[in-house]
Image: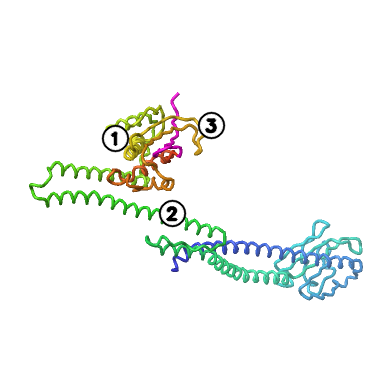
């Protein structure tokens, strides 16, 4: 993986976000820890100063006032600790050796309580001191002030050491966490990369391959399942497309071959034995008409598969379309009679041209296979509780014939494209093998269904169920 790909990867972004979040948390925690530690050390120092002030206050009554100068107090802590006992006028009564000859180290407190301050420097040493001042009662009944101070070096050293430790630990902790997150995310995304590589390696002729499933049951596993289902659908669609192209090529080649044969036979025959030109032209024209009908059907299916089928919908009097198509079919049905007495009014919503094609295809199919009669019925029916497909009132169109019928094994195949089930459905009987497939596709796009009516006693009867349109009030 190249550097730009690494920096732009999900793995890098997750790692960077996690590292940044942890760094922020650790920095805030470190600041809080240092603040708490500094406050705790200050409180401990203040408590120590207060205890020492208590000890000094207890001995104030024993101080001599003989004018021999300030009393020098013992100082076990050396220059790190300072004690002064002064009058409210600023005269030093007693002090540790490092504070006898200097002025008071702090002002006289105003109230009776302790006054605690931090000073950046004292006359005895250029360093920071914490000073506690307290008023006490002297031997003669007057007020004295006890100043107790201690160097803050130890507190500062502890805080600095803690700060240095935090500054050292945070980068290592962030780096360690980033490494762990990088490894974990990489391990987690490894199945995704395997899926990506498998899909990237698939060609148009390799759609039988499937992406690997990690089998963990998590989102990535479900992604693999979804990808495999999508590839399976794509494989099925590709196979249908390839079969469609192969079937279309075969179907188009047949009329072309017959036209070529017609013309070659006529061209090879002696002039005196040739058929009249109008016979040859008629045969060729019939083949051209057949091929044009096939191409028209192919275009309808191609538009439907591409999602470009007509979408204009409006209320349509389905009975008018049925009666018009019955009249047209009667003109070419020959000895086959078409009974339309069962046609009643029915209003549906849809594209008139497409619905007309449905009726025409069903009628042509019935006339082609009927022995003597075709029966067409149409009615509206309101079903309590609604249609099984969720439709309330429906229009029921049936087109039946008294032909050889369709066996139970052929029920599903009859709606497949380019299907011809027997000799009665051969090319010589007409038809392209696409009429029923087109009819079912149109009906389903109109929210209905086209099925073989299981109640037919003889021959084949097709049933169209369409939702009715609301009638204007």
Q: Which residue is mark 3?
A: 384
Question: In the picture, which quadrant includes the C terminus?
Answer: top left
**Measured along the vertical axis of the image, is residue 84 above or below residue 300?**
below
Q: For this view, does 467 lie left or right of residue 418?
A: right
The label nearer to you, 3 versus 2, is 3
Mark 1 and mark 3 in contact (Cβ < 8 Å)?
A: no
**Residue appearing at x 53%, y 66% in the figure:** 186
In front of the other: 451 or 38: 451
| Magenta region | 454-473
The label nearer to you, 3 versus 1, is 1
| Residue 48 picture location, percent across and down | 81, 67
The label nearer to you, 2 versus 1, is 1
Q: Residues within 10 Å of mark 2 (few under 14, many from 20)?
A: few
Mark 2 and mark 3 in contact (Cβ < 8 Å)?
A: no
| Residue 140 picture location, percent across and down | 91, 63
| Residue 51 picture location, percent across and down | 84, 66
Spatial CA distance of label 3 from label 1 is 39 Å
Sequence-wise, the earlier of marks 2 and 1 is: 2
């Amino acid at each position: 993986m190249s550097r730009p790909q690494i920096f732009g990867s999900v793995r890098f972004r997750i790692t960077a976000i996690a590292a940044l979040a942890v760094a922020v948390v650790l920095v805030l925690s470190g600041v809080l820890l240092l603040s708490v530690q500094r406050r705790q050390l200050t409180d401990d120092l203040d408590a120590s100063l207060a205890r020492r002030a208590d000890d000094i206050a207890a001995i104030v009554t024993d101080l001599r006032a003989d004018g021999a100068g300030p009393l020098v107090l013992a100082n076990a802590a050396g220059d790190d600790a300072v004690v002064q006992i002064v009058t409210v006028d600023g005269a030093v009564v007693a002090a540790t050796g490092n504070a006898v000859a200097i002025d008071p180290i702090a002002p006289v407190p105003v109230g009776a309580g302790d006054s605690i301050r931090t000073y950046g420097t004292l006359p005895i040493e250029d360093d920071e001191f914490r000073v506690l001042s307290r008023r006490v009662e002297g031997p003669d009944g007057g007020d004295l002030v006890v100043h107790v101070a201690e160097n803050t070096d130890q507190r500062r050293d502890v805080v600095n050491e803690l700060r240095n430790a935090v500054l050292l630990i945070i980068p290592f902790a962030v780096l360690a966490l980033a490494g762990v997150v990088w490894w974990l995310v990489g391990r987690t995304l490894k199945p995704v990369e395997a899926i990506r590589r498998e899909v990237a390696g698939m060609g148009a002729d390799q759609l039988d391959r499937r992406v690997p499933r990690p089998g963990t049951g998590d989102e990535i596993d479900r992604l693999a399942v979804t990808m495999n289902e999508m590839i399976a659908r794509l494989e099925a669609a590709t196979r249908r497309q390839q079969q469609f192209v192969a079937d279309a090529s075969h179907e188009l080649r047949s009329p072309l071959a017959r036209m070529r044969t017609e013309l070659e036979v006529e061209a090879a025959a002696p002039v005196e034995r040739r058929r009249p030109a109008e016979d040859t032209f008629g045969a060729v024209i019939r083949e051209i008409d057949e091929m044009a009908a096939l191409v028209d059907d192919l275009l309808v299916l191609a538009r439907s598969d591409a999602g470009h089928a007509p979408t204009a919908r409006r209320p349509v009097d389905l009975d008018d379309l049925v009666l018009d198509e019955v009249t047209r079919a009667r003109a070419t049905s020959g000895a086959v009679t078409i009974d339309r007495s069962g046609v009643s009014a029915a209003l549906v919503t849809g594209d008139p041209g497409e619905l007309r094609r449905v009726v025409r295809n069903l009628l042509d199919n019935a006339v082609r296979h009927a022995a003597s009669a075709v029966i067409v019925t149409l009615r509206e029916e309101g079903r309590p509780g609604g249609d099984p497909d969720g439709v309330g009132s429906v229009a029921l169109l049936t087109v039946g014939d008294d032909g050889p019928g369709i066996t139970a094994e052929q029920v599903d195949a009859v709606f497949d494209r380019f299907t011809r089930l027997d000799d009665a459905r051969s090319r010589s009987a007409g038809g392209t093998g696409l009429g029923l497939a087109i009819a079912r596709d149109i009906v389903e796009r109109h929210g209905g269904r086209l099925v073989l009516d299981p109640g037919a006693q003889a021959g084949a009867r097709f049933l169209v169920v369409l939702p009715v349109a609301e009638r204007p009030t």
